[in-house]
Amino acid sequence: MAALKPGVISGKDYQTLLQACKDGKYALPAVNITSTNTLNAVLEAAAKNQSDVIIQLSNGGAQFFAGKGLEDGDKAKVLGAVSAAQHVHLMAKHYGVCVVLHTDHANKKLIPWVEGMLDYGEQFYKEKGVPLFTSHMVDLSEEELDFNISECRRLLERMAKIDMSIEIELGVTGGEEDGVGSDEIDNDKLYTQPEDVLKAYDVLKEVGHASIAASFGNVHGVYKPGNVKLRPEILKNSQELVQQTHGTKANPLDLVFHGGSGSEKDKIAESLNYGVFKMNIDTDTQFAFAEGVGTYVLENERAFKHQIDPDNGTPYKKQYDPRVWLREGEKSMISRLDEAFTDLRAAGKSLTLPESQRKVA
């Protein structure tokens, strides 16, 4: 397989990357970012691990990226996402890896957010010949199945014209992600029916490319062991149904693992056999960033109370400089991502590397 150019990828190059993931039985961490610090940490971690990566924003993360001072929250969600995307387009190629640029859960009330980003995306495509984002996620899993699929088709028709893909959700991921979802969900909705996956596949493949987040017990956040019961065999059953129905090769679906933080490593490994190319990780990386900053602050407590030590006159500017403690957050987040790249078997497999230099196992 020929090497891809580093930077944001889309269209056929994106699908080439997904096929490589499935063929090699590895997946990419999809990391939610909220700032240039978290964004740059993801790029640095990907480069360090010689792996391609997925960078994504939730609606709240996008709003925060724009700055909490903007009074129009809806506008800020669009502008923040666009600003972050422009940053990634500028910087990703210099880190030497492929980046999938994505937005996370958008339920029915957030469809205007997606459409607002598409307005900018269409203009970007007109000017640059490539889309601003690789894909957007539309999460209508709480709605009736027929509406979920038909509305996703409507939006995919628009996305496909500018070489974009869509991610949809079938079944419900438990917990909450930036105001989308709920802790009060019927247990049976946490497990997607393969027949529903086939129905969505049949409708969307006529329009463009779609990846599917099929729920197999996934939950956002981190919970006590035993509280989350993952059943990756549901993914296997969905793949087999589509394969048998359409006579495709194995694992025809491009599947997404939501709620990866805190998941059992053996379940992660099993899911990689069933066409999972993407695993969302947010809660763990949020904690890692906070832990790095918190540890530094506790170790340098006086520097965060006094500019100059009242007892001995020591100046603390070098300790409370935001660049110093924010860097500690970045380093801690990078360390957690090292673990994710290893768990997902992605390290050393960037498609920007010559094929002879890519890690095989």
Image (cartoon, helix red, strand yellow):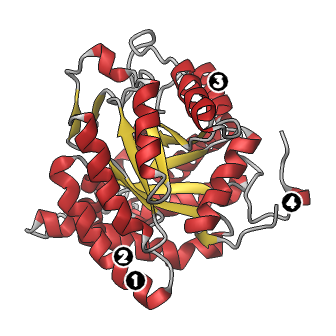
Mark 4 and mark 2: span between their CA atoms? 32 Å
Name which residue lies at 57% across and 32% down: 245
| Residue 270 in which image quadrant | top right
Name which residue lies at 45% across and 14% down: 229
Q: Earlier in the sequence, mark 1 or mark 3?
A: 1
The quadrant of the picture occupied by the N terminus is bottom right
As displayed, is residue 259 above or below residue 19? above
As displayed, is residue 66 above or below residue 211? below
Q: Are marks 4 and 3 in contact (CB under 8 Å)?
A: no
For mark 3, give the secondary structure. Answer: helix
Q: Which residue is mark 2?
A: 121
Looking at the image, residue 73 sits to the left or right of residue 265; the answer is left
Q: Name the residue at the left extreme.
A: 71
Q: Which residue is mark 4?
A: 355
Mark 4 and mark 3: span between their CA atoms? 26 Å
Q: Position of residue 67 (x, y in %)?
A: 22, 67
Q: Earlier in the sequence, mark 4 or mark 1?
A: 1
Q: Mark on residue 270?
A: 3
Q: Amino acid at mark 1?
A: Phe
For mark 2, give the secondary structure. Answer: helix
Q: Which residue is mark 1?
A: 124
As displayed, is residue 313 above or below residue 201? below
Q: Earlier in the sequence, mark 4 or mark 2?
A: 2
Q: Position of residue 161 (x, y in %)?
A: 42, 73
Q: Amino acid at mark 2?
A: Gly
Mark 3 and mark 2: span between their CA atoms? 36 Å
The quadrant of the picture occupied by the C terminus is top right
For mark 4, give the secondary structure. Answer: helix
| Within-10-Å neighbours for mark 1: few <14, some 14–19, many 20+ | some
